């Protein structure tokens, strides 16, 4: 009996990834020089996709280092979905555990910000709330209102290193500033129109966005933000988030009975 | 029955659409011009990429040429992928939809290539079932592209052209004849490309692909690399096929070392002139 198509495909994947193929047809194919074309194309496709998605990482470490790391990642974590546009969501974690990257503690953060760009770029199109929209609501209405975060907004606080400044310089293709201070930083990426934009944000603003994303009302989100950053100017924080396009909607709720 | 080449008669010679050419593609106006994209690159929730595709679609006919439906995998096509494809089709109303006679997604992993398989009876049933399911879900006919070959595969029950004809007969799908793939495979497997083209069912051909290729490091194998101008041998086979079957929508693929847009337009003009010559011949 002829072995099945499924067993052929299992064996072909084994051969692609350098394992012994348990199918005589695949063994005969893997012995031909042409088999390398498939192996190269598969890995090249993965590495190219990572190169497209992580440009700041690549600029930091150089093409050769990047492609070696990307090939190792591709062998460990082949794509699980057919849209390579989104390949590499665990690449930052891979870099955090990647021994050759040990001396570059900011690299996973830079990779995370590259991936935030990918997500922000293809997120759902939606309008965003302006400062004027918010000013039109009464303070009573606002207290219990919820700010719904825009689908393109991505943010994170990097506690131990200036990942944002390093990412930004490499994303924009300029030198990291000579006066770089080695301290924690926050970053916000958003897409208020057709372009992804970025800005630094404080630890309190990150906590505020976290709370909004968790569904907290404005009062509770403000308390959480102030808990993380007691001296923060909350009004300034909210208006800068609005100007960045980070908020999609003010969900007003009726006053409590 | 409506003949396939009449349903898409407005399509002459088209170009693969690259992001660096969005503005040029939007602005250009040429008789018969259309554009083709991989739907996988536009299966996103929103953003500028999708907005560009819709903008270009407002000026030009569009074709969706899938690379990852994995029709020859021994499993049903991924339902979520089919749904995303259907959503995109509803959004941009393409003139043509096509896929490959190959597999790439298997056991929850995606291997980004068009992988080969032995053309057995079992594979024939599986491919036909998968094409049938896809056409039923999408509610339209699709074209299936002949693959490029680099290997001698043991265990075929069918020649490729007979396999494709049988797939057409059983599912009602059409064919996308990639002439560069025929040229490259004919070189790598030492077969006669003209006999291959002679065996293609003329009525089934919905689309033709042209592209450039390159030799591998040893110079032994040709690679379907889409990184060069179209080779003269490929141009001759294209003329040969059009002489036999008449004009069909033809597309130039260029995915690497992509030149300036006007250079692609020059290649397109040459492809269009072959169609125009054949139309005159048919009319006479």
Image: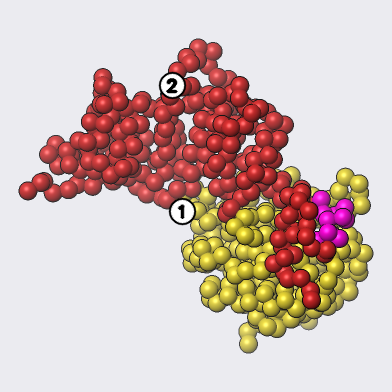
Query: Residue A89: image x %, image y %?
Result: 54, 43
Q: Which residue is mark 2?
A: A184
Query: Residue A101: image x %, image y %?
Result: 62, 27
The chain that appears yellow in the image is B
On screen, residue B101 above or below B200: above
* Dot in front, 2 or 1: 2
- Judged left or right of residue B187, residue A77 is left
Please say whether residue B142 is visible from this viewpoint.
Answer: yes
- Please name the residue shown 61% across and 21% down the image: A103
- Please name the residue shown 59% across and 57% down the image: B108
Q: Chain A hue?
A: red
- Judged left or right of residue A106, residue A29 is right
- Residue A188, label in figure: none
Tag 2–tag 1 contact (CB < 8 Å)? no
Q: Are marks 2 and 1 on the same chain?
A: no
Q: Which residue is mark 1?
A: B45
Instruction: Name the secondary structure under disc 2.
Output: loop
Please say whether residue B37 is visible from this viewpoint.
Answer: no
Instruction: Name the secondary structure under disc 1.
Output: loop
**Disc 1 chain ID:** B
What kind of secondary structure does the magenta stretch mostly adopt?
A: helix
Colour convention: by chain
- Please name the residue shown 76% across and 71% down the image: A3
Instruction: Compute the Cα span from label 2 to label 1.
Output: 32 Å
- What range of the chain is rendered magenta? A26-36
On screen, residue A50 above or below A172: below
Report the quarter where the N terminus of chain A lies.
Answer: bottom right
Quarter-of-image position of residue B182 = bottom right
Q: Depth check: B107 or B88 in front?
A: B107
Query: Residue B253: image x %, image y %?
Result: 72, 56
Q: Within the magenta stretch, is there residue A31?
A: yes
- Please name the residue shown 76% across and 51% down the image: A19
């Amino acid at each position: 009996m002829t072995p099945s198509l499924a067993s052929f495909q299992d064996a072909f994947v084994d051969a692609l990834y350098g394992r012994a193929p348990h199918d005589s047809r695949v063994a005969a194919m893997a012995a031909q020089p042409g088999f390398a074309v498939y192996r190269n194309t598969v890995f090249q496709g993965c590495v190219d996709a990572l190169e497209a998605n992580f440009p700041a990482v690549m600029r930091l470490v150089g093409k050769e280092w990047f492609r070696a790391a990307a090939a190792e990642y591709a062998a460990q974590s082949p794509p699980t979905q057919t849209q390579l546009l989104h390949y590499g969501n665990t690449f930052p974690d891979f870099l955090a555990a990647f021994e050759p990257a040990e001396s570059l503690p900011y690299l996973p953060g830079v990779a995370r910000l590259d991936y935030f760009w990918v997500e922000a770029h293809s997120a759902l199109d939606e309008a965003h709330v302006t400062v004027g929209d918010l000013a039109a609501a009464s303070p009573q209405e606002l207290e219990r209102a919820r700010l719904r975060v825009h689908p393109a907004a991505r943010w994170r606080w990097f506690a131990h290193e200036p990942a944002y400044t390093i990412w930004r310089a490499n994303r924009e293709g300029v030198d990291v500033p000579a006066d770089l201070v080695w301290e924690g930083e926050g970053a916000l990426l958003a897409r208020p129109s057709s372009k992804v934009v970025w800005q630094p944000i404080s630890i309190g603003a990150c906590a505020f966005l976290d709370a909004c994303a968790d569904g907290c009302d404005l009062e509770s989100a403000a308390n959480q933000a102030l808990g993380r950053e007691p001296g923060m100017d909350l009004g300034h924080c909210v208006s800068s988030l609005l100007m960045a396009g980070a908020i999609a909607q003010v969900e007003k709720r009726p006053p409590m009975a | 029955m409506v003949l396939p080449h009449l349903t898409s008669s407005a399509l002459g010679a088209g170009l693969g659409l690259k992001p660096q050419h969005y503005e040029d593609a939007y602005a250009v106006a040429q008789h018969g011009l259309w554009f083709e994209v991989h739907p996988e690159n536009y299966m996103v929730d929103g953003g500028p990429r999708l907005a560009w595709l819709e903008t270009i679609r407002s000026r030009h006919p569009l074709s969706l040429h899938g690379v990852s439906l994995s029709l020859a995998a021994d499993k049903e096509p991924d339902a979520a992928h089919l749904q995303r494809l259907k959503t995109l089709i509803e959004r941009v109303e393409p003139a043509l939809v096509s896929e490959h006679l190959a597999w790439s997604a298997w056991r929850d992993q995606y291997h980004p290539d068009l992988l080969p398989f032995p053309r057995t009876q079992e594979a024939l049933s599986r491919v036909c079932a998968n094409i049938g399911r896809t056409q039923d879900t999408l509610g339209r006919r699709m074209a299936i592209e002949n693959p490029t070959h680099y290997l001698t595969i043991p265990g075929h029950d069918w020649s490729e052209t007979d396999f494709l004809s049988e797939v057409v007969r059983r599912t009602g799908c059409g064919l996308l004849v990639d002439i560069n793939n025929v040229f490259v495979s004919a070189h790598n497997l030492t077969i006669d490309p003209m006999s291959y083209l002679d065996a293609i069912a003329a009525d089934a051909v919905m689309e033709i692909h042209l592209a450039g290729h390159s030799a591998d490091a040893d110079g032994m194998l040709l690679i379907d690399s889409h990184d060069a101008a179209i080779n003269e041998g490929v141009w001759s086979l294209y003329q040969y096929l059009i002489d036999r079957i008449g004009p069909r929508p033809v597309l130039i693929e260029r995915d690497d070392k992509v030149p300036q847009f006007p250079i692609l337009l020059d290649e397109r003009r040459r492809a269009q002139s072959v169609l125009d010559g054949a139309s005159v011949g048919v009319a006479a």
